Amino acid sequence: MHLRTVERIELPPAADMHVHMRQGDLMKLVAPTVVQGGVDTAFVMPNLVPPLTTVERVLEYKKELEAAAPGVNFLMSLFLHPTITPEVIEKASAAGITGVKLYPQGVTTNSDAGVADMKAFYDTFSAMEKHDMVLNIHGEVLESLAPKGTTLEEAFLPTLQSLHERFPKLRIILEHCSTAAAVEAVKACGPTVAATITAHHLYLTETDACCNPFAFCKPIPKKATDRDVLIRTVAEGNPKFFFGSDSAPHLLHTKTDAEPGKAPAGVFTQPFATQLVLLGLQDGIARGEIAEDAISEETLANFLSHYGRKFYKLPEVSATSTKKIVLVREGAKIPQSVRSADGSVEVGNSRAGDEVFTLKWEEK
Ligand code: NCD
Ligand code: ZN
Ligand code: ZN
């Protein structure tokens, strides 16, 4: 297949293993966009206000999401916090909660209650290993802790490696990996360590992120060479690397009203999640980073759907869905924003104005 010219692509429903669904009216606006982006299974982040630190609240939140977006399989997570003891892990596992998200304290949106001392959680990690829960990591250090010339993500990689050595059976996901070094580090670990790759890290670099609030996120997009390693990693097809959009909606005015460099971190890609992955790959082909025929339907199905489900030990999509997603070129363009009916809630889209495939759901 030549991705830049193909007129029609058929894929299984995608699994987006890193989404921010937020709360209240913003949740009601963004939850339905999961399906629009071709996704039937979504792993939901717990960095709400306040963070999701009890099993009860996670289950309540799951119900709210299911009401807002019927038909989506929402996989849930707890926010790692001193109250997440081995007993809570046992209870969470019994309640069907999938993962626990580790945010180093203060590194990203709503992470003030995050982890300051990793060692304090070793018993919790042991319990997670025992109950086969997934540890999802926002792999960055605080700016003050990164050696000069090292990115916040690169400075975190030794911690990933040592956690894996200490807990080799614990399934760990390095979320939204953004550097060539992170890709190498994940490859160097055993099969229990994987990473998600977003759509936007396939097309943004530091030059975009510095100056466009709608391209600013954590981890900050890096050099063109890092972006191209991510593209090649998708093209090569490695089960350790799968899709997690990290779509992170922020109210439009908080982005546009912010002083330069002070906008809240997060790129919103959910309504076009699948198409934006394709766009990032198409750009990579246009630049000659990967060959014209480097991306097959199988490559896309693996990255967007199969590999993530497999790592999470979910049933195969063919066993859980009667549907497929069909992408066709109809000259559609990404609108500026997604807005509620009364206009009070509005989120700006990534790559607004760019031409994308139109996505339809059909029976197989
Ligand atoms: C995310 C958010 O807004 O919740 N922001 C981001 O830039 N990615 C948090 C996160 O995933 O780090
Ligand atoms: Zn993160
Ligand atoms: Zn995120």
Image: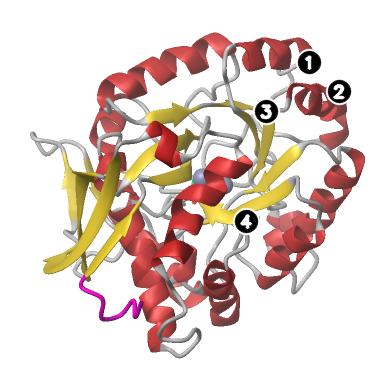
Span of residues in magenta: 1-7
- Counting residues from the start of the chain, the first of labels 1 and 2 encountered is 1
Q: Which residue is mark 4?
A: 239
Which of the 4 image quarters holds residue 16?
Answer: top left
Answer whether labels 1 and 4 touch (C-beta < 8 Å): no
- Counting residues from the start of the chain, the first of labels 1 and 4 encountered is 1
Quadrant into which the N terminus falls: bottom left
Quadrant into which the C terminus falls: top left
Q: Identify the element where label 4 is drawn.
A: loop
- Counting residues from the start of the chain, the first of labels 4 and 2 encountered is 2
Question: Residue 110, labelled with which disc?
Answer: none
Asked if the beta carbon under badge 1 is closer than 8 A to the nearest atom of ligand 2, the reply is: no
Residue at the image position 26 percent from the left and 25 percent from the top: 68
- Counting residues from the start of the chain, the first of labels 4 and 3 encountered is 3
Report the Cα–Cα distance between label 1 and label 2. Answer: 6 Å
Question: Nearer the viewer's eye, disc 4 or disc 2?
Answer: 4
Report the Cα–Cα distance between label 1 and label 4. Answer: 30 Å
Question: Residue 80, labelled with which disc?
Answer: 3
Answer whether labels 1 and 2 touch (C-beta < 8 Å): yes
Q: Which residue is mark 1?
A: 86
Magenta region, main secondary structure: loop
- Residue 335, horizontal then vertical, whole percent: 16, 59
Report the Cα–Cα distance between label 2 and label 3. Answer: 12 Å
